[in-house]
Amino acid sequence: MLEIANVDARFTSRLGELDALEAVSFAVERGEFVCLVGPSGCGKSTLLRIIAGLLPAVSGEIRIEGQRPTGPSNKVGLVFQQPTLLPWLTVGDNVALPLQIRGDSTSEIEARVAHLLALVGLADFGQEYPANLSGGMAQRAAIARALAQDPEVLLLDEPFGALDALTREYMAGELLRIWEQTQRTVLMVTHSVEEATLLADRVVILSARPGHVIEIVDVPLARPRHPSMLATMDLQQIVQRLREALYRGNQPGNGANRPGRTVGPGKT
Ligand SMILES: Nc1ncnc2c1ncn2[C@@H]1O[C@H](COP(=O)(O)OP(=O)(O)OP(=O)(O)O)[C@@H](O)[C@H]1O
Ligand SMILES: [Mg+2]
């Protein structure tokens, strides 16, 4: 469904050149849930922006259903790391916006928005403004908006990063439910290895910048899954393996100190 082949990313700024990604390759199967973990500043958001067609790759290519996207496409829905609901529109109008831009009829839009708000548990909040939502509700609305155009691939960039631990766990359960109902292909960035293990079929571990794939770990836990599984031995054993791979790949001399990082302090 989604192929990422040898993708390099580089930024040129006042400080000089900065390599963000180095030869990143992996694939996501149709209907699969893949999580991407790696240290802060290793290029995770950059990779999602490249896949979404918002940023060009320096080299390498992205294929979605075998085709190379040439810019932002309806096949990809993205939930950004920062909240991006438009504050002057109601929740319903935020979700409707991509459909209005696409030119759907008013009745189609109304039906689709009602369906999506119900799916994310916001059926009663369509007329509300984003400022009056909790953090978790705002992220649900953002997920509904990303699903509006029925994308083949849903990209989620740390969607629960700003939420408290309890809400985060609850939202992970909600996301599992939404994923099971919609059967979309999902690529999600998270800095929580526990969350990645609970949600994903496979976890892609990136090194420090310039980000490259250290390891891809299978998560053979049975589905359907539920946040209560976080406490189980089976899940925690996989979490431990992921942590070890993450630390192993991010020792000094690996990742951050690799040749290719030419200038500038990282966020790490
Ligand atoms: N528009 C830009 N111009 C210049 N440098 C950028 C730009 N966007 C990102 N970078 C740099 O590229 C690197 C990767 O950034 P990116 O946001 O992809 O990291 P990340 O893995 O998503 O980090 P985090 O986990 O903190 O969100 C960072 O060093 C960042 O400073
Ligand atoms: Mg990021």
Image (spheres, rainbow, N blue to C red):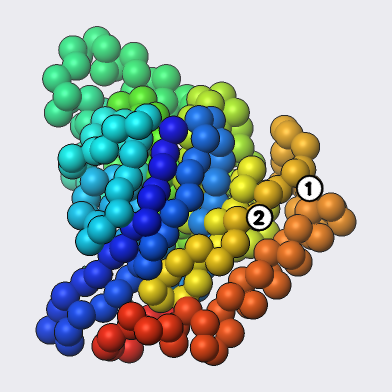
Helix, strand or loop at mark 2? strand
Residue at image x 26%, y 38%? 68
Q: CA distance from mark 1 to mark 2?
A: 18 Å
In the image, residue 200 sits, relative to residue 206, either above or below, namely above
Helix, strand or loop at mark 1? helix
In the rendered structure, the answer to whether residue 17 lies left or right of residue 151 reads: left
Of residues 177 and 26, the one nearer the viewer is 26
Q: Which residue is mark 1?
A: 229
The location of residue 124, given as percent across then percent down, is 44, 28
Query: Answer yes or no: do the residues labelled 1 and 2 have beta carbons within 8 Å?
Result: no
The location of residue 88, given as percent across then percent down, is 19, 44
Foreground mark, 1 or 2, reads: 2
Does the image show residue 213? yes
Of the 4 image quadrants, the one containing the C terminus is bottom left
In the image, residue 156 sits, relative to residue 122, either above or below, namely below
In the rendered structure, the answer to whether residue 86 lies left or right of residue 39 reads: left
Of residues 254 and 167, the one nearer the viewer is 254
How packed mark 2 is, by other alpha carbons closer than 10 Å (few <14, some 14-19, many 20 or more), is some
Q: Which residue is mark 2?
A: 217
